[in-house]
Image (cartoon, rainbow, N blue to C red):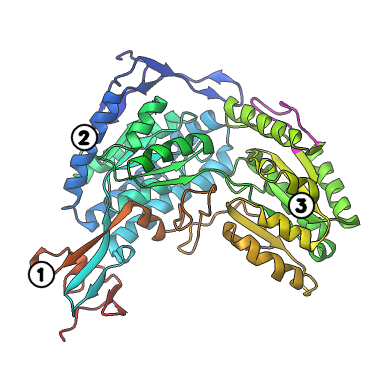
Amino acid sequence: MTEKNVHPVLIAGQWRPADATQTFVVENPATREPLPGEYPISSWRDCDDALKASAAAAVALRDTSRQRIAEFLENYAARIEARREELVELAHAESALPKSPRLADVELPRTASQLRQAAAAAREGSWALPTIDTANNIRSMLSAIGPVIVFGPNNFPFAFNSVAGGDFAAAIAAGNPVIAKANSSHPGTTRLFAEEAHAAAHAAQMPPGLVQLLYRTGHADGERLVSDPRVGATGYTGSRGAGLKLKAAADAAGKPIYLELSSVNPVVILPGALEERFDDIVGQFCTSCLMGAGQFCTNPGLILLIKGSTTEKFITAAIERFSHAAVGTLLSQNVESALGKAIATLRTAGARIFTGGTSGGGQGYSYSNTLLGVTGEQFLAKSEVLQTEAFGNASLIVIADDIPQAAQIIDTFEGNLTGCIYSDTTGNDDAAYDKLAPRLLAKVGRLLNDKMPTGVAVSPAMHHGGPYPATGHPGFTAVGIPAALRRFAALECFDGVRPHRLPPLLADAAPSGKPWRLIDGEWTRGDVRPK
């Protein structure tokens, strides 16, 4: 396909026309009008060519120093910042997310920071957990796993972008080439990132298959891609339905795949907390749920309260705020449609609409701010369906009869990215907290106290993951360096290997950067000491 208005793909270090018979266009969600240009739906030939180049790059990267990889990431971060205005404008047009503060002042700086943090981890090397047993002359470390496929989500065009976000940064820092599959909601933004990544890779004399870009493939080709023998691992953020199909294909081939799928992020508000700081909690909940039209993976989609007059007052106040708050623009027609279907599913299961429940009300693709409710008994009778994720500006309130029933409700929760408990500051809720917190902790990747879950700090201690179906594996995080790198690594062991054949991180002399190494059971930055 060579039409001038169809954007090329990036394969093997070259921008070239895609092998495609179909294209797609992107709409501005705020106007519902198509944006200029078309994007190709690549055939398997494009996928195969990208895999060939990526496999060759993986071999070349084994001889590439940690310093060069770090320099590539840092140069790329600087190039992104230099192209800030164009990136913000196009991402705004494709997503309707606010230019400021969201895109320009929050997401873009976070994206550059993630790349620099990944660079620092690559340069220093401790992330690889180098381990040395001198008595048996056995040494091991985490090392690059091979070509990584990254599927980016629709709701973070910068920070989780398949050619710039956390998965990309972690995979590259671990020494792997990346084949990026752009999200169909913001392919133009992804193309701009790929242009700068390509330029940075060329400047650093990296192998031509280091960064490659496909805009879209058929479903069957996507499943074939993640299960190909040449692939090391896949990172995916998106819908549960599509993610599970990719997981089935990858699992059948024995290929690691790290998924972020769905989460309702339950928030438990105990009676003492509500009595103590009612207005503050109401405000926090409404702000968190409606911010960005609720299009966050950590949006509070389920609120668990204990029956009583203060709870009724909370519902009344929340209804008032939801009803009068501006209705935000959703990311696409698909998001609007999916939100409507999810709310219909909740209603069919017995949820009562307190406010909202209709499409429209905002600019472009939108859905009214929606608050639903069920009793604890209703929830326990249909707990699985009542945990359907309504991705957007909607939340379900569950009213338990008492703390024992609240404990039963929590026991039915699926895995979630986050869970939160609000309790009073005088200790009156402590007994209830002690009963509920261990149950909730078993169901979430991150437990919060007294704050809504929408913020995800880029911290080494952060766990942005959780039990299924929040993710596909509870032991890994998509945010937080250096831990995020370890998803895209394999453990390599060297038994009796001659000293000059060892990788630098396992040599007797401490490598550059002085990484922490576990030598004979002791963490040290020093050399291997003679016995």
Q: Main secondary structure of the magenta part?
A: loop
- Disc 1: CA contacts within 10 A as few (<14), some (14-19) or many (>=20): few
Which residue is outermost to the front? 381
- Sequence-wise, which precedes: disc 2 or disc 3? 2
Q: Residue at x 62, y 38 (%)?
A: 391
Drawn side of residue 456 relative to residue 336, left or right: left
Where is residue 488 drawn, in percent x and y?
Answer: 34, 51
- Tell whether position 463 is magenta: no
- Residues 386 and 304: in front is 386
- Give the residue type that dot 2 points to: Lys
Instruction: Find the magenta span and give its range.
Output: 355-370
Question: Can residue 239 be seen in the rendering of this structure?
Answer: no
Looking at the rendered structure, the secondary structure element under dot 1 is helix
**Which quadrant would residue 192 be assigned to in this image?**
top left
How many angstroms separate mark 2 from mark 1 (CA)? 32 Å
Q: Which residue has dot 3 on it?
A: 283
- Give the residue type that dot 1 points to: Pro
Q: Residue at x 50, y 29 (%)?
A: 185
Vertical arrangement, residue 439 with respect to residue 339, above or below: below
Q: How many marks?
A: 3
How many angstroms separate mark 2 from mark 3 (CA)? 53 Å
Q: Which residue has dot 2 on it?
A: 52
Where is residue 407 drawn, in percent x and y?
Answer: 72, 60
Where is residue 469 drawn, in percent x and y?
Answer: 54, 47
Where is residue 56 drawn, in percent x and y?
Answer: 18, 40
Drawn side of residue 453 relative to residue 177, left or right: right
- Sequence-wise, which precedes: disc 1 or disc 3? 3
- Tell whether position 367 is magenta: yes
- Residues 525 and 255: in front is 255
Quadrant where the image shows the N terminus: top left
Q: Which residue has dot 1 on it?
A: 499
